[in-house]
Image (cartoon, rainbow, N blue to C red):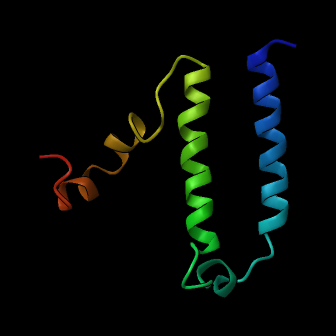
């Protein structure tokens, strides 16, 4: 197994376990938390963004945020003045 296949396999396994762990969380559990730490929702967002940045690099591509979101979210991006 080459390194790209190994990393892809590890990411797939991590995603399976993450989904299995989080699928029964309530909205209060996802958004609640401690004033001293990020809530589960923020942590999941960071995990998703990290994976979105890592996987395309392994495949010599670009992250979805850098490519796909420009066309999908352009009205939203215009509204918050990220694009003209």
Q: 1 left or right of 44?
A: right
Horizontal arrangement in the rendering, residue 40 relative to residue 8 (left or right)? left
Q: Quadrant of residue 22?
A: bottom right
For image coordinates 85% across by 54% down, the residue present is 17
Question: From the viewer's perspective, is residue 22 above or below residue 29?
Answer: above
Q: Is residue 4 above or below residue 23?
A: above
- x%, y% of residue 14? 80, 46
Question: Where residue 84 sits in the image (x, y, percent)?
Answer: 11, 46
Q: Nearer the viewer, residue 31 or 34?
A: 34
Residue at position x 57%, y 72% in the image: 38
Q: Is residue 20 left or right of residue 25?
A: right
State the count of labels: 0
Compared to residue 3, the image places residue 22 above or below, namely: below
Determine which quarter of the picture holds residue 60: top right
Q: Residue at x 27, y 58 (%)?
A: 76
* The furthest residue to the top: 2
Q: Where does the image place residue 30, in percent across and percent down from the top left?
A: 65, 77
Residue visible at 82% across and 31% down? Answer: 9
Quarter-of-image position of residue 57: top right
């Amino acid at each position: 197994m080459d390194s790209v296949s190994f990393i892809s396999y590890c990411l797939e396994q991590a995603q399976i376990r993450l989904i299995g762990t989080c699928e029964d969380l309530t909205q209060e559990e996802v958004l609640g938390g401690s004033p001293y730490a990020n809530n589960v929702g923020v942590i999941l967002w960071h995990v998703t963004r990290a994976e979105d940045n890592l996987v395309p690099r392994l495949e010599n591509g670009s992250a979805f945020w850098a490519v796909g979101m420009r066309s999908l979210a352009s009205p939203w991006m215009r509204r918050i003045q990220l694009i003209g």
